[in-house]
Image (cartoon, rainbow, N blue to C red):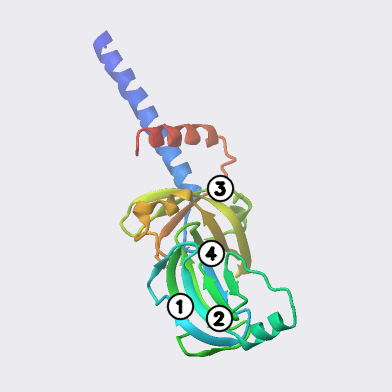
Amino acid sequence: MTWTNRLRLWLSVMLSLVLIFLLVILFNQRQHLIQSTSATIIAPRVQVASNYGGIVLKQYVTVGQHVSVGDKLFDVSSVSLQQDIANHVKVASSDALVIDPTKGTLTYRATTSGAVTEVEAQEGSYLSPTQPLATITGDASRIVEAQFLLTPREYALMDKGATVTLTLPDTSSVTGAVDSALVQTKDGQAIVTARIISQALDNRNLQLLATDGAPVRAALRLRDEGILAGPTDAMRELLHKAGL
């Protein structure tokens, strides 16, 4: 056998070994990646409720309207408030509520920016104390609630802060992390409902894709304790830097 043939043989063997090694690492990586059975984007909701019973004098918002912090929502005239003021009961305004002691009225204001998703009080209607007026679904601080079906062994490898890849409806992806989780056991398997946070979900460019209730897919990265953990992490980091 000539040196050229020997060199070709060694190169073929080396390439085969490298390919097998990469395939083993890829297999190991996929073994520690769990797909969600369901996942949904959830935006924070703020419910505005009445402090005093009274009549709605003016309604400033409708369902679907966008509001900013400080925007007026409702003006309410309250006999109970007027009685408290007459009896020298101390009542104070706040960011959510402006009280006019001379008129005996309350002006409810938005304390968060977002869309008005529910309106339960109309102009001219009577409100009882603590009755809901409206619900505002916020623009920011979205989370994902995802459900995973895990074996006991897989559940033991799930950590707080574990990396989660979120695939949005347009197939683009953002990265998040497990913030908390609830678990139930059924038929020997763990049904895990995880709360996933990701700052990328609050990006203005994703508002329509990352709206409240939008379906997503979540891929959970479990802790790898095997001998291939180091090479797998290195390969994953290399692929990430390469944009793959």
Q: Residue type at mark 4?
A: Thr
Pointers 2 and 4 in contact (CB under 8 A)?
no
Q: Nearer the viewer, mark 3 or mark 1?
A: 1
Q: Position of residue 228 (x, y in %)?
A: 52, 35
Pointers 2 and 1 in contact (CB under 8 A)?
yes
Characterize the local packing of mark 3: few (<14), some (14-19) or many (20 or more) Cα atoms within 10 angstroms.
some
Under tag 2, what secondary structure? strand
Instruction: Tell me which numbered mark, 2 or 1, is placed earlier along the sequence.
Output: 1
Instruction: Indicate left or right for 144 with 19 as reference.
Output: right
Q: Which mark is residue 111?
A: 4
Q: Nearer the viewer, mark 3 or mark 4?
A: 4
Q: Which mark is residue 242?
A: none
Cα separation, mark 2 vs mark 3, equals: 38 Å
Under tag 4, what secondary structure? loop
Vertical comparison of 214 with 119: above or below: above
Pointers 3 and 4 in contact (CB under 8 A)?
no
- Residue plotted at (59% across, 51% down): 158
Residue 39 in sight: no
Vertical comparison of 8 with 186: above or below: above
Task: Place residue 151 in its image quadrant.
Answer: bottom right
Cα separation, mark 4 vs mark 1, equals: 16 Å
Q: Which residue position is annotated with label 2?
A: 132
Q: Residue type at mark 1?
A: Glu
Q: Which residue position is annotated with label 3?
A: 162
Q: Position of residue 40 (x, y in %)?
A: 45, 64
Under tag 3, what secondary structure? loop
